[in-house]
Image: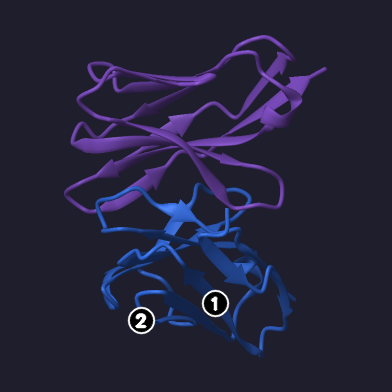
Chain colours: A blue, B purple
Amino acid sequence: ETGVTQTPRHLVMGMTNKKSLKCEQHLGHNAMYWYKQSAKKPLELMFVYSLEERVENNSVPSRFSPECPNSSHLFLHLHTLQPEDSALYLCASSPGVTDTQYFGPGTRLTVL
Amino acid sequence: GEDVEQSLFLSVREGDSSVINCTYTDSSSTYLYWYKQEPGAGLQLLTYIFSNMDMKQDQRLTVLLNKKDKHLSLRIADTQTGDSAIYFCAELINAGNMLTFGGGTRLMVKP
């Protein structure tokens, strides 16, 4: 299943680094999402974009900055992260915000 | 607030049926989903059920929904070792356009 792709698949970064996660969907969907999956918590919704407009922001720290330049691409810019930000970051897309979501393979992020 | 709960582990023998259970609290959910996550991978949509249905069958998978008890289950017939994974249930609540996930059930299939 290659409808939703994410790069890189693995990322190790120091707390002072700046990096970006990329998500691309080839399904013609209008909504895209970022989720965080850490070991001891259920999946957490971070951001929702619909037609390139942010529609949901679940009190995510400002060190995470999303960008949606078009309906096919979604970025998550990272800066001055903390070790507790280490997690699997999953991107998803759906035709609309009330429709079934399809997930990418995730980026495994480790913050040293 | 919304809460979706699942048991943490389930262990079955190859060839047996597996039943993974999920309870939710928000009665305004529209769709309920089952996702599968294999090690190191993202979530794969397995099946979903609309909230006005009580059963859906798709090959080896049977989803049962009891709206009165807010209980969702996924039955996997003839479980195979390749079914070993973490299974997440999720509910879509129309009001907030949010997909709320359970904590996942790790299914282990023994040969």
Depicted A73 relative to depicted B77: above or below: below
- Vertical side of A90 occupied by B85: above or below: above
Who's the residue at 67% across and 29% down the image?
B83
Q: Position of residue B65 (x, y in %)?
A: 32, 20
For marks 2 and 1, the one nearer the N-term is: 1
Residue B92 position by quadrant? top left
Q: Compared with residue A52, is residue B30 higher up or lower down, i.e. above or below?
A: above
Secondary structure at badge 2 equals strand
Q: Give the residue at the far top of this rendering.
A: B16
Circle 1: is it few (<14), some (14-19), or many (20+) Cα within 10 Å? Answer: some
Instruction: Indicate the quadrant containing the C terminus of chain A: top left, top right, bottom left or bottom right.
Output: bottom right
Whether residue A29 is visible: yes
Q: Which mark is residue B72?
A: none
Residue at the right extreme, as displayed: B111
Q: Return the residue at label 2.
A: A70
Tell if the residue under mark 2 belongs to the same chain as the one under mark 1. Answer: yes
Name the amino acid type tagged 1: Lys
Report the residue marked by disc 1: A22
The picture quadrant where one finds residue A13 is bottom right
Tell me if I can see residue B1 in this picture. no
Q: Residue at x 45, y 53 (%)?
A: A102
Left or right? Give the position of A72 relative to A8. left
Q: Would you say the residues marked 2 and 1 are in contact, meaning their CB atoms lie under 8 Å apart?
A: no
Q: Which callout, 2 or 1, points to the residue nearer the camera? A: 2
Q: Amino acid at mark 2?
A: Asn
Q: Is residue A102 above or below residue A50?
A: above
Which residue is located at x 67 percent, y 71 percent? A83
Please state the chain letter of the residue tagged with numbered disc 1 in the rendered image. Answer: A
Q: Position of residue A35 (x, y in %)?
A: 47, 61
The local secondary structure at tag 1 comes to strand
Which residue occupies the foreground of this view, A50 or B101? A50
Q: Nearer the viewer, residue A54 or B15?
A: B15
